[in-house]
Image: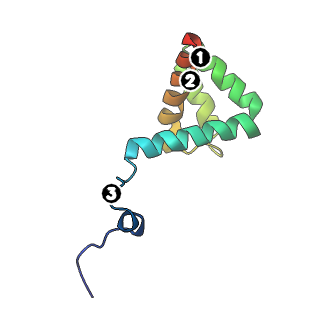
Amino acid sequence: MSFFRRPKSSQAANPSQPAETRAEIMQRRAREYIRTLQNSYPREYERLLSEVENDDLARAQLTLRGLGSVVDEGYLESVLQEMQEQVTAARFA
């Protein structure tokens, strides 16, 4: 039995391609949660979007916490950040 760490299979298959960083994973998952809200919970998504557009982030966070069955607690900040970026991009587009 070897005590040396072996590379994960995804890294071993393509060592020239770096693994996803934690921030990239958080951002990707946040986007997935937002898509889920848009498609499966449109009313809650619209409420959340309105709160983010009005810079009422405390209320938006409470709304997200109320959607705990959809959005994991660890991703609340990432989802809010991603929605803020989308709102800002839409304003300047």
Q: Which amino acid type corresponds to the residue marked 1 in the rendered image?
A: Ala
Q: Earlier in the sequence, mark 2 or mark 3?
A: 3
Q: Is residue 70 left or right of residue 20?
A: right
Q: Is residue 60 left or right of residue 41?
A: left
Q: Specify few, some or many for label 3: CA neighbours under 10 Å numbering under 14, 14-19, or 20 or more.
A: few
**Disc ID at residue 74:** none
Element assignment for label 2: helix
Marks 2 and 3: which is nearer the front? Answer: 3
Q: Earlier in the sequence, mark 3 or mark 1?
A: 3
Element assignment for label 3: loop
Element assignment for label 1: helix
Q: Which amino acid type corresponds to the residue marked 2 in the rendered image?
A: Gln
Q: Please name the residue that numbered disc 2 is placed on.
A: 86
Q: Is residue 11 above or below residue 74?
A: below
Spot occupied by residue 14 in the image (x, y as percentages of width and height): 38, 62
Quadrant location, the C terminus: top right
Q: Residue at x 54, y 14 (%)?
A: 55
Q: Residue at x 54, y 11 (%)?
A: 92
Quadrant location, the N terminus: bottom left
Q: Please name the residue that numbered disc 1 is placed on.
A: 90
Q: Please name the residue that numbered disc 3 is placed on.
A: 16
Q: Specify few, some or many for label 1: CA neighbours under 10 Å numbering under 14, 14-19, or 20 or more.
A: few
- Give whichever of 44, 81 is nearer the camera: 81
Q: Which amino acid type corresponds to the residue marked 3 in the rendered image?
A: Ser
Mark 1–mark 2 CB contact (< 8 Å): yes
Instruction: Give how far apart the Cα atoms at labels 3 and 1 are.
Output: 36 Å
